[in-house]
Image: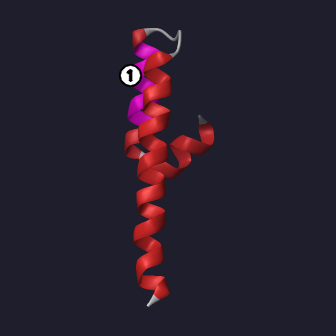
């Protein structure tokens, strides 16, 4: 069933994009507090964190 597997695929895609976004946050010139806040936002709100970032 395609719908059953598509949720897993999109979940995995969001996970990969979250990892990439967190990596980019840590590479950035932001302060430590800014990095922590962005990382927490992306971790707790994966889809919206990516959109806002």
Chief secondary structure of the magenta span?
helix
With 18 as the anchor, is 52 left or right in this view?
Answer: right
Residue drawn at x 48%, y 64% as measured from the top left: 10
The C terminus - image quarter: top right
In magenta segment, residue 8: no
Residue drawn at x 41%, y 14% as measured from the top left: 33
The N terminus - image quarter: bottom left
In magenta segment, residue 40: yes
Task: Give residue 4's quadrant in the image.
Answer: bottom left
What x and y, as percent, mark residue 21?
Answer: 49, 34
Residue drawn at x 49%, y 45% as measured from the top left: 17
What x and y, as percent, mark residue 49?
Answer: 52, 42
The 10 Å Cα crowd at callout 1, few under 14, some 14 to 19, many 20 or more, is some
Q: Which residues are magenta?
A: 33-41
Between residues 13 and 49, which one lies in front from this camera angle?
A: 13
Residue drawn at x 45%, y 42% as measured from the top left: 18
What x and y, as percent, mark residue 23?
Answer: 43, 28
Residue at numbered disc 1: 36
């Amino acid at each position: 069933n395609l719908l059953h597997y598509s949720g897993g695929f999109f979940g995995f895609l969001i996970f990969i994009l979250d990892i990439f976004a967190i990596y980019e946050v840590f590479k950035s010139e932001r302060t430590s507090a800014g990095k922590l806040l962005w990382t927490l936002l992306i971790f707790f709100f994966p889809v919206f964190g990516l959109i806002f970032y």
